[in-house]
Image (cartoon, rainbow, N blue to C red):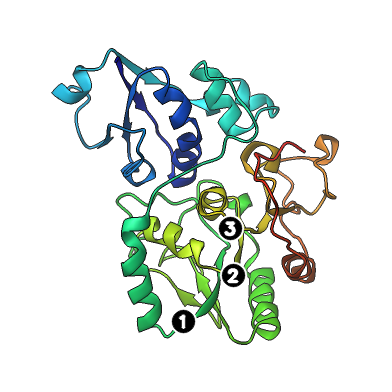
Amino acid sequence: MKLNTYVVEGGVGKCTAFSALISKLKQKAEVQIYTPYIGCYAGNPNVKMAFEQTLSLKDPRIMASDNIFYSEPYKSNFQFGKEHLIESYCRLHDVEYHKSMIPKIYTEQHKEKVKEWLTKNEIEKYILIQFSGGQAQVGHNPNNQYVNINPNRNYQPFLAQQVVHSLREEYPDTTIIDCTLLNEPGFEDTIKANDLHWTEVHELLKGAEGFVCIDSCLNHFSPSANKQGVVIWGSTRWTQFGYSHNKNLQFHMGDKWDESLYNDSDPRNNMVDSKIVVDEYKKLEKPKEIFCATE
């Protein structure tokens, strides 16, 4: 069987999204991945090997490939705003797309570590939150000043704190776990999961009551972990990065995406009232199926 190596770049969320293609890529040839986030592909039965990008592309195991493929959706027709990220990856790699293609990463090996962390912190029931992001997990230095390359995705800290307080009032026996990095804004009545690796956060999500987040890694982890939550959208479209099982919220939008109301530079995009966020969280009902968001 042929051997193809795929170069996958970007952040944790983007690399997680690419995992939706793996099973179909395996139908063409054996699959290897060259990426900064090997945890998105480690343990995947359809991946022969995942290589960190600190390794040279000239490594003999990569050079043994029949093909080395590279694609960058962000520098393609994806920019027109009409394709989901997974759909764009499919087009670029000549894979037939269906909206039921969702991310799948394998983190069962971290189950005991997560259980120990929860026990140590005396946590039983919990909700995950992530109201900021945009930093690379690889090589992250918590002593550095927080710099976000796309700050308009972040939920306003004032509103975020209101969401936390309301969740604590509504669910007093439930711990709110903040999944942002150590140098990002923190909130009262929460505990940071800063001593858990991001792959362990994916495993942590599996046991959560739910989550509230922005367009960041929790959003892309959610279909893989089969967990439902509320996602607050700012400068990005949920029709390009979101999933149907979550409640997707944006200041200007109703239940369906309306492109005529979208402006990625509008600072009001993610200013969804905290009461709406919590009310929608309380109304969540587990769906039968999970799809890429298309409307």
**First-in-chain label (3 vs 2):** 2
Q: Residue at x 42, y 21 (%)?
A: 27
Image position, residue 119 (x, y; %):
38, 81
Tally the numbered discs: 3
Q: CA distance from mark 2 to mark 1?
A: 12 Å
Around disc 1, counting alpha carbons within 10 Å, would you say few (fewer than 14), some (14 to 19), or many (20 or more)?
some
**Residue labelled with disc 3:** 227
- Residue 112's place in the image compared with 18, above or below, is below
Q: Residue at x 43, y 38 (%)?
A: 10
Q: Give the structural element (helix, strand or loop) at label 3.
A: loop
Which quarter of the rendered picture does the C terminus lie within? top right
Image position, residue 67 (x, y; %):
31, 14
**Residue labelled with disc 2:** 209
- Residue 86's place in the image compared with 3, above or below, is below
**Residue labelled with disc 1:** 123
Around disc 3, counting alpha carbons within 10 Å, would you say few (fewer than 14), some (14 to 19), or many (20 or more)?
many
Image position, residue 246 (x, y; %):
68, 53
Q: CA distance from mark 3 to mark 2?
A: 8 Å
Q: CA distance from mark 3 to mark 1?
A: 18 Å
Say which of 155 and 220 sits in front. 220
Question: In this rendering, would 275 be left or right of 115?
Answer: right
- For residue 195, say whether it is visible: no
Say which of 264 and 198 sits in front. 198
Say which of 103 and 269 sits in front. 103
Which residue is most to the left? 60
Disc 3 residue type? Answer: Lys
Q: Give the structural element (helix, strand or loop) at label 2.
A: loop
Which quarter of the rendered picture does the N terminus lie within? top left
Disc 1 residue type? Answer: Ile
**First-in-chain label (3 vs 1):** 1
Question: In this rendering, would 252 be left or right of 225?
Answer: right
Image position, residue 255 (x, y; %):
83, 49
